[in-house]
Image (cartoon, grey):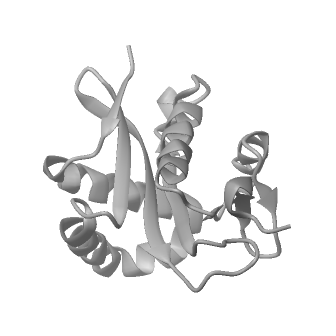
Amino acid sequence: MISYRKAEKSDISELVRIRSIFLEEYDGENHLKNKDNVNKEVEKYLHEFMETETFTGFVAEKDNKIVGTSAIAFYDILPAVHYLNGKLGYISNVFVFPEYRKQGIAKKLFELVVNEGLARNCSKLTLHASKDGEPVYEKFGFIKTATEMEYINEKFYDK
């Protein structure tokens, strides 16, 4: 059985390892060339922001082993028509190990980060998607733009 929870500081070393696997899968050779530096920076970031209002991560577990992750980072910008309150969320690292894919785990992890963003009153949620991920995110109401996918929270949209 798969269980879901917010990531904790005690998960950091495993989250760094999984982020590295994700980046290798997503960005291949570029990541491998800079793996050690990236891993150090990811670890530093997680230690700094994990227990703040700036970052929330989620994990899926089976038998006390993390089998998938998702994350959302929060930031503020000057308000505009598509984000009246200036609160934005960037979704990243939606990842499930290959042997656990096609079981709805990524969908549930994605639901958790989207709901976290909406609960935090984000006007807009953005992400960069793999080709495999695009159809999943479209089902949640995300639309593809020139550089990313985005979801506009109608509650904060001035038409």
Q: How many marks?
A: 0
Would residue 82 appear left or right of 51 to someone viewing this image? Answer: right
Q: Which of the pair 8/61 is nearer the observer?
A: 8
Image coordinates for residue 76, horizontal then vertical, percent: 49, 77
Image coordinates for residue 142, horizontal then vertical, percent: 75, 53
In the picture shown, does residue 118 fall above or below 89?
above
In the picture shown, does residue 97 fall above or below 38?
above
Q: Which of the pair 36/74 is nearer the observer?
A: 74
Q: Which of the pair 72/44 is nearer the observer?
A: 72
Residue ID at (46%, 55%): 120
Residue ID at (51%, 59%): 92
Name, please, the residue furthest toward the bottom: 78
Name, please, the residue furthest toward the left: 10
Image coordinates for residue 75, horizontal then vertical, percent: 46, 74
Residue ID at (86%, 67%): 159
Would residue 33 appear left or right of 8 to someone viewing this image? Answer: right
Residue ID at (58%, 26%): 104
Name, please, the residue furthest toward the right: 159
Q: Dividing the image into 4 quarters, which one contains the N terminus? A: top left
Quarter of the image for residue 149 reads bottom right
Quarter of the image for residue 21 reads bottom left
Image coordinates for residue 107, horizontal then vertical, percent: 59, 34
